[in-house]
Image (cartoon, rainbow, N blue to C red):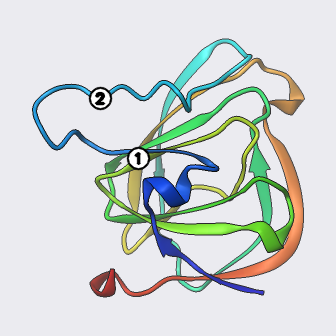
Amino acid sequence: MKLVAEPITAAAFEPFGDVITAPQTYGRQTFTDGLAHDARPFVLSTTHTKSSEMPLSIDKLERHTHSSQTFLPLDAKRWLVVVSTTSESSSLRAFVVPGTTGVTIGQGIWHYSLTALDSDASFAVIMWKNGTPDDTEWATITPVIIETVPASST
């Protein structure tokens, strides 16, 4: 199965969580609707990830049953987020996200690992963990090939 990643929009990503962008005018935006948890404590981490070669073959997904998970790029160009409301390959959606945009993946939403495009990238990650084995649940899926358009075309 092949899937072409689409440019992210708030409307297209809404079933899976929130798109986080800087305000276009002076002032503050608050993103509380997509943040959810039934776990403690709050965890803020940073991660540095190598860029991935495209097309990308994926065969597993993860989800966090006790928490949403927010990814905020610190030093990134484009990155990829692959999400689904089920662990079925046929229900996957893939989005290309600019390096100026973060996302909150909703509590219980299946997703693929953080994937940098074009160059290595750094992110801040916010979530809650309760330390139980089901903080992160994994599913093996029928392999899916994810394709993107080149950076100059997006």
Residue 48, above or below 106: below
Could you say which is closer to the camera, residue 58 or residue 98?
98
Left or right: residue 15 versus residue 76 is right
Question: Please, what is the three-letter code of the amino acid marked with disc 1?
Answer: Gly
Cβ atoms at labels 2 and 1 below 8 Å apart: no
Residue extending farthest front: 11
Tell me which label, 2 or 1, sits earlier in the chain. Answer: 2
Residue farthest to the top?
A: 40
Secondary structure under badge 2? loop
Is residue 72 positioned above or below 57 on the image? above
Res 60 quadrant in image: bottom right
Q: Which of the numbered marks, if any, corresponds to residue 102? A: 1
- Residue at 87%, 68% (x, y): give it: 141
Mark 2 nearby-residue class (10 Å; few <14, some 14–19, many ≥20): few
- Residue at 76% x, 39% y: name it: 108
Q: Is residue 87 left or right of residue 117?
A: right
Q: Residue at x 36, y 25 (%)?
A: 30
120 vs 76, nearest the viewer: 76
Residue holding disc 2: 29
Q: Which mark is residue 72?
A: none
Within 10 Å of disc 1 (Cα), the crowding (few <14, some 14-19, many 20+) is many
Q: Is residue 147 above or below residue 84?
A: below
Q: Position of residue 144 (x, y in %)?
A: 76, 79
Give the quadrant of residue 124. top left
Q: Quadrant of the C terminus?
A: bottom left
Left or right: where 32 falls relative to 76:
right
102 relative to 126 in the view: left or right: left
Which secondary structure lies at badge 1? Answer: strand
Residue furthest toward the left?
A: 26
Disc 2/disc 1 C-alpha distance (Å):
13 Å
Label 2 is placed on what type of residue? Answer: Gln
